[in-house]
Structure formats: C-alpha cells, structure tokens
Image (spheres, rainbow, N blue to C red):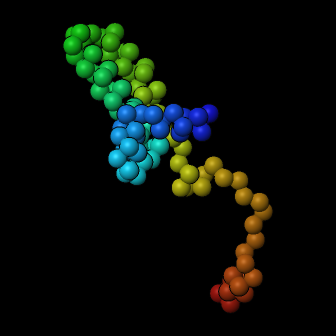
C-alpha cells in the first residue's frame, strides 16, 4: 500500500511540475504533509465561509487525527526488541578495574 501511495504521488501537480522541469522530486513525507495541510486549510476556509457552529467545531476535533496523524518515533528505540545482550569483552575488563 505504501508503494502504491508513493507511485500515486508522482502524479500530484507539485511533483509533476518538479519532474517536468528536471528538478529533484519532493520527498514522499513532505508531499504528504503538504497534502494534509492543504486539506486542513480547505476545511478551515469552508468552516469560515459557512459560519462557525459548535457542530462544525466538533467535526473538526473529530477529524484532526485523520488530517494530521501522530507517528511513532523510531529514533528512541522504544519499539525495538533486542536479544539478550552482554557487554563487549573490553567493557568487562574495564568494569573489573573500576570495581
């Protein structure tokens, strides 16, 4: 599915313009963020054009997770499972000297 999305983004008007002008393509992440932001701006514009009601505000709150989702971090190693790990031999030697 991810590969299909990557392929579909080649046909986005911003991406096509870059490729036709022989410029480097935008990254998939930045292009998808741009699309999400454009959707949010369009929603807010529709929201303002049609008047603000409590029902519409609640609708925005319900949709915000779909528009700008949270992604788990891969930088902090929190979701990784490691096998039983032992210190390197040089570290074992160092620990004996300190103790």
**Residue 21 seen:** yes
Image location (x, y in percent) of residue 5: 54, 34
**Towards the viewer: 54 or 47:** 47
Seen at 27% across and 9% down, the residue is: 53
Seen at 34% across and 27% down, the residue is: 40
**Towards the viewer: 59 or 47:** 47
- The reply, left or right, for residue 47 in relation to residue 26 is left
Image location (x, y in percent) of residue 57: 32, 16
Query: Residue 55's quadrant in the figure?
Result: top left
Quarter of the N terminus within the rendering: top right
Question: Is residue 32 placed above or below 74 in the rendered structure?
Answer: above
Image location (x, y in percent) of residue 45: 25, 20
Seen at 76% across and 71% down, the residue is: 86
Residue, far bottom:
97
Image location (x, y in percent) of residue 80: 66, 53
Quarter of the C terminus within the rendering: bottom right
- The reply, left or right, for residue 94 in relation to residue 29 is right
């Amino acid at each position: 599915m991810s590969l299909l999305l990557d392929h579909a983004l080649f046909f986005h008007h911003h991406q096509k313009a870059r490729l036709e002008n022989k410029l480097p393509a935008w990254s998939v992440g930045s292009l998808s963020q741009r699309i999400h932001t454009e959707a949010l701006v369009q929603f807010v514009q529709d929201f303002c054009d049609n008047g603000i009601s409590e029902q519409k505000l609640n609708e925005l709150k319900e949709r915000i997770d779909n528009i700008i989702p949270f992604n788990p971090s891969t930088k902090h190693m929190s979701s990784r499972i490691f096998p039983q790990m032992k210190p390197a031999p040089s570290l074992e030697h160092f620990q004996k000297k300190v103790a």
